[in-house]
């Protein structure tokens, strides 16, 4: 008898436990269910649906369409829209000297859920830019174009005497050389840069011009490229040389004064000395 009593009590406990369980689990929240995608196992049995009927109610995303959601689905499994971060600052122009593009990005902070708004497909944005942080030698795989160019030079103090007839670029052949690339007064907004050259050959006639006498074999020169002399297409000075290669130079307004030189120091964003006889500017 004692054994039967114990078994009866245990059975009652089990029945009450099961009954209490089903009584407690009556919605998505109490069941701990919220399923983003269609899921046939994401349901609560024998409870009230949103439409007021009793039966198996679901806590998955398609239940709204199927009209069999549990009564608390909208509050417990609330739709969440995608949340994006603010746009980052624009990155550096990918071309250090000339036309290029800059990029900015944003990231997903919270992905959408339960039918919320989707994340935008645009995670990055681009815009055109003009790079001016690395205007040194033209970036090309082979410097064939530079090798064939002639560097037309004048004394560095030309920048001091621009208005004088002696150095003015608005006279004779200098007018064409100086302004042919700047129609409508368009001048590249690029920083000045320079190169260091050693003359390997110089014509004899250089000695006939006072300022060109220093242009003789073995002489080292500082040669500057200024924005007003930069070619619009190349966005650099023509004839600015190729490192460790021999190219051609010609002195403006010095009759038959021309020769060869070799760039012995890479281009750098610096200026030459306006008051030195060995400093020149490309025209």
Image (spheres, rainbow, N blue to C red):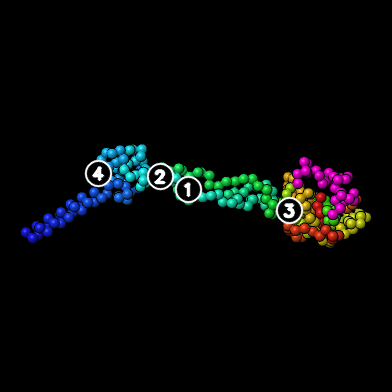
Using the rendered view, name the quadrant where residue 6 is placed: bottom left
Q: Is residue 61 left or right of residue 172?
A: left
To which residue does mark 1 refer? 83
Q: Find residue 213 and report its horizontal and vertical position in percent.
A: 90, 58
Magenta-colored stretch includes residue 177: yes
Q: Residues within 10 Å of mark 2 (few under 14, many from 20)?
A: some
- Marks 3 and 1, how far apart at CA: 42 Å
Left or right, residue 137 beside residue 51: right
Dot placed on the residue nearer the N-terminal end, 2 or 4? 4
Tell me what residue is drawn at x 74 percent, y 50 percent. Answer: 236
How much space separates mark 1 and mark 4, taking CA atoms?
36 Å
Q: Are marks 3 and 1 in contact (CB under 8 Å)?
A: no
Disc 4 target residue: 46
The reply to whether residue 5 is in sight is yes
Label disc, if present, on residue 79 of the rendered structure: 2
Identity of the residue drawn at 51% across and 43% down: 121
Dot 1: element: strand
């Amino acid at each position: 008898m004692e054994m039967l009593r114990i078994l009866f009590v245990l059975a009652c406990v089990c029945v009450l436990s099961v009954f209490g369980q089903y009584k407690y689990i009556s919605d998505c929240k109490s069941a701990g269910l919220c399923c983003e995608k269609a899921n046939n196992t994401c349901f609560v049995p024998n409870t009230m649906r949103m439409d007021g009927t009793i039966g198996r109610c679901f806590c998955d995303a398609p239940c709204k369409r199927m009209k069999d959601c549990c009564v608390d689905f909208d509050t417990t499994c609330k739709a969440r829209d995608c949340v994006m971060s603010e746009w980052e600052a624009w990155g550096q122009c990918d071309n250090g000297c000339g036309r290029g593009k800059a990029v900015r990005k944003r990231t997903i902070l919270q992905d959408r859920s339960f039918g919320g708004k989707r994340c935008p497909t645009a995670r990055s944005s681009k815009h055109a830019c003009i790079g001016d942080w690395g205007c040194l030698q033209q970036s090309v795989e082979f410097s064939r174009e530079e090798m064939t160019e002639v560097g037309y030079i004048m004394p560095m103090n030309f920048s001091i005497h621009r208005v004088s007839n002696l150095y003015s670029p608005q006279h004779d052949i200098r007018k064409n050389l100086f302004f042919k690339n700047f129609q409508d007064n368009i001048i590249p907004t690029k920083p000045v840069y320079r190169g260091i050259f050693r003359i390997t050959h110089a014509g004899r006639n250089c000695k006939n011009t006072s300022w060109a006498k220093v242009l003789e074999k073995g002489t080292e020169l500082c040669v500057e490229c200024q924005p007003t002399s930069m070619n619009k297409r190349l966005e650099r000075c023509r004839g600015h040389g190729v490192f460790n290669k021999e190219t051609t130079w010609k002195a403006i307004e010095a009759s038959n004064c021309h020769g060869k030189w070799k760039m012995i120091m890479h281009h750098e964003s610096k200026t030459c000395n306006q008051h030195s006889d060995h400093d020149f500017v490309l025209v």
